[in-house]
Image (tube, helix red, strand yellow):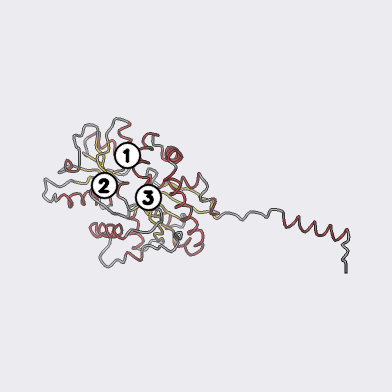
Amino acid sequence: MTSVISRRDVLAVLASSLVAASPRPAQAADKLRVGKSVLEVFGYIPLDVGMKYGFFQKQGLEIEEIIFTSGSKQTQALTAGALDIALSGGAEMAFVAKGAPEIAIGSITASPAFMGINVGPNSTARGLDDLKGKKIGVTSIGTLTAWLVDELNRVKGWSSEGDRAVPIAIGGEPAAQLSSLRTGQVDAVVSSPAGGYQLEEEHAGRSLVDVSTYVKDLELFVLFASTAIVQQNPSAVRRFLKGWYDAVAFLQSHKAETVQTTVDAIGYAPTVSARVYDRLKNQFSTDGKFSQKGLDKLYASFLDLKVLDKSTDMSKLYTEQFLPKA
């Protein structure tokens, strides 16, 4: 039997089709408050790349970037519930062990090449051996930068009073480091290769060596998440890491875009940003997995600095459960 469709039936079908085809309201993006412990770290640039080129937006995330002047201030903000994700030094894992409401969720880099030793314009030093018995500026005593000086002494076998390089606390601000070099308060500073390149641009000093010349593996920069965001929105944590490592992959194959992003975000000169990019682009972790050798060296630094003891179980301070699957 032939079915007859009335005009009313046709209009009803058309109306329902239009409703089905009309765009649905977009789901609101999850907002994440993401902190940088300090501004002048090239290791944190994937965040800016990811924001600029839509890698976090693609994951349904809205990023609020918050820049701190020290890791301790960032930890205070996270503890107060004002931060969801933190980009910080691996040394932050000691705070996790002491009960800070956070956990390490991914490696940024296990390469000490992101740290360097820089000297002033009048220095005659040409390598590590020339730092024997010298005063080396560090952020403060009892920190990773001070440990790097102690580790240099250990590696070189400088154990006597006159031979040991001496860590001098000068703070972490580039201006303070420059002033300390100019006044002769210190002979060198533990900073970053970028800081040395910037000194060269200003004819105020130069990069001497990067730390990887004597420390081969170290979980140097790490991604942390607050325990609150891990419990309340684990999907957002997972999607943040996907956006981050997608940004790293983009960074490694797009020099011009990354260099300009570095200029805009940190304020380095284009020539400095280009040199930093060429030196460090391949030192980023591409999958976020923690290096066991890097963790072991970080643990050794904790013991040397007496911030943790041998009872600490490093495996409790990080997780890889949110990392993108290969």
Viewport quadrant of the C terminus: bottom left
Percent from the top left, x then y, of residue 90? Answer: 34, 55
Indicate the secondary structure of the residue bearing disc 3.
Answer: loop
Q: Residues within 10 Å of mark 1 (few under 14, many from 20)?
A: many
Identity of the residue drawn at 88% across and 61% down: 6
Q: Give me the disc on residue 195.
A: 1
- Residue type pointed to by label 1: Gly
Q: Residue furthest front?
A: 1
| Image mark count | 3
Percent from the top left, x then y, of residue 164? Answer: 15, 47
Q: Give me the disc on residue 284.
A: 3
> Disc 1 vs disc 3: which is toward the camera?
3
Percent from the top left, x then y, of residue 196? Answer: 30, 38
- Residue type pointed to by label 2: Val
> Disc 2 vs disc 3: which is toward the camera?
3
In-front residue for pair 244/302 = 244
Percent from the top left, x then y, of residue 104? Answer: 39, 59
In-front residue for pair 238/37 = 238
Viewport quadrant of the N terminus: bottom right
Quarter residue 125 falls in? top left
Q: Which residue is mark 2?
A: 211
Distance between mark 2 and mark 3 Cα atoms: 16 Å
Name the side, left or right, on which 130 lies relative to 26.
Answer: left
> Quick one: label 2 or label 3, which is nearer the N terminus?
2
Identity of the residue drawn at 22% across and 58% down: 304
Q: Residues within 10 Å of mark 3 (few under 14, many from 20)?
A: many
Q: Are marks 1 and 2 in contact (CB under 8 Å)?
A: no
Indicate the secondary structure of the residue bearing disc 1.
Answer: helix
Quarter residue 13 falls in? bottom right
